[in-house]
């Protein structure tokens, strides 16, 4: 039977050596990115990586840069690399459409672009409401805003995963060994592919971070409280568990303040970001609603460094005397 592995991973440079080892075992790789001008030239080395990336909007520049160099290596080995992200592709086409002077209501009501526009608009509005509320609103209203955003974000991910699954299915028939690149939040993508392709492919999820954590003798990486809340709404659109949802939202406030956001450029074998994410997940998982409510006013306006100090002081105060172990890992 043919094989398809859906590789879930974080977007950090430290995971790329593991990604390379796994991608190298497949004949074709579906990348989690929309088709972009100059991609084939970049792979053929007739266009430099920096020149290729210059016009692109990159959330993680170092990750994108390092991935490009990996893609060049894989292409040189004869691997087929295909950019597949229809949701983002449609979103970019909407931007071009509006830039020509068209209005949102001019979009064809049955088109993919229309549904992408609606879900993106709703998610963006919910996110902006959260940002506004988090600056001046109460703890309770901020928790409510996070829950509302998680619902809108889940609707966006359901459409995004569905569109991507359809396109991968359309292109997968002629290949025997396929790797699908995916972010951790896109777990539904594996289920959609498995349901449609299980008769001809052995479709399996692969969590790349677990290879790293195994070497660090750590427990497997899990999802942040915000991602858990979003995933719950992805799989259960009518979810109504107010107490649990509010707790996940409250924990996500603290998690988002203490997680390291800037790309770390040290030794990748230390897996700094992966270790930090795992640690922050563990910390947030131990917080009660009252803990989050107490910490919220102390860190709501703090930068990451200060927020980590405040949370560390809170947690270390709970430890028995003589066993004050550091809460956060240090950069190597």
Image (spheres, rainbow, N blue to C red):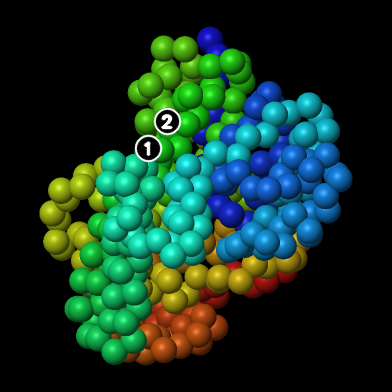
Residue 160 percent coordinates (x, y): 40, 45
Q: Left or right: 234 with respect to 21?
A: left
Q: Residue at x 40, y 25 (%)?
A: 194
Q: Are marks 1 and 2 in contact (CB under 8 Å)?
A: yes
Q: Which mark is residue 16?
A: none
For the question of whether residue 136 can be seen, the reply is: yes
Q: Residue at x 56, y 52 (%)?
A: 10
Distance Cα–Cα, label 1 vs label 2: 6 Å
Image height of 182 relative to 13, above or below:
above
Q: Left or right: 155 with respect to 330?
A: left
Q: Secondary structure at mark 2?
A: helix
Image height of 30 relative to 286, above or below:
above
How crowded pointer 1 is (Cα within 10 Å; few <14, some 14-19, many 20+) is rated as some
The mark tally for this picture is: 2
Q: Left or right: 278 with respect to 47?
A: left
For the question of whether residue 17 can be seen, the reply is: no
Q: Secondary structure at mark 1?
A: helix
Residue at which label 2 appears:
166
Residue 46 percent coordinates (x, y): 86, 45
Q: Residue at x 43, y 33 (%)?
A: 165
Q: Nearer the viewer, residue 240 or 168?
A: 168
Q: Nearer the viewer, residue 261 or 328?
A: 261
How crowded pointer 2 is (Cα within 10 Å; few <14, some 14-19, many 20+) is rated as some
Residue 6 percent coordinates (x, y): 52, 33
Quadrant, the C terminus: bottom right
Q: Which mark is residue 162?
A: 1
């Amino acid at each position: 039977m043919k094989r398809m592995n859906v590789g879930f991973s974080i977007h950090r440079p430290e995971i790329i050596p593991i990604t390379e080892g796994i991608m190298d075992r497949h004949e074709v790789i579906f990348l989690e990115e929309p088709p972009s001008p100059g991609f084939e030239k970049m792979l053929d080395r007739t266009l430099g990586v920096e020149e290729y990336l210059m016009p692109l909007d990159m959330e993680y520049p170092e990750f994108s840069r390092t991935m490009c160099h990996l893609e060049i290596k894989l292409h040189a080995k004869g691997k087929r690399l295909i950019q597949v992200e229809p949701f983002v592709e449609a979103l970019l086409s909407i931007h071009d459409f509006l830039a020509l002077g068209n209005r949102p209501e001019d979009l064809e009501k049955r088109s993919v672009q229309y549904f992408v526009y609606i879900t993106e608009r709703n998610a963006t509005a919910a996110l902006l409401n959260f940002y506004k509320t988090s600056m001046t609103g109460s703890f309770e209203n901020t928790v409510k805003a996070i829950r509302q955003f998680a619902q809108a974000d889940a609707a966006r991910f359901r459409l995004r995963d569905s569109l991507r699954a359809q396109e991968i299915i359309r292109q997968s028939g002629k290949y025997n060994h396929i790797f699908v690149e995916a972010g951790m939040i896109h777990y539904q993508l594996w289920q959609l592919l498995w349901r449609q392709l299980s008769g001809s492919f052995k479709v399996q999820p692969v969590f790349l971070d677990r290879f790293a954590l195994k070497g660090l003798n750590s427990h497997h990486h899990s999802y942040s409280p915000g991602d858990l809340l979003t995933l719950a709404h992805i799989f259960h659109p009518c979810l109504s568990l107010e107490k649990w949802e509010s707790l996940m939202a409250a924990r996500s406030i603290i998690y988002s303040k203490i997680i390291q956001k800037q790309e770390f450029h040290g030794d990748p074998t230390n897996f700094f970001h992966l270790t930090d994410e795992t640690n922050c997940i563990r910390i947030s998982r131990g917080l009660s609603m009252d803990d989050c409510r107490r910490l919220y006013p102390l860190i709501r306006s703090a930068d990451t460094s200060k927020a980590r100090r405040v949370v560390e002081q809170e947690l270390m105060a709970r430890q028995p005397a003589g066993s004050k172990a550091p809460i956060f890992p240090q950069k190597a």
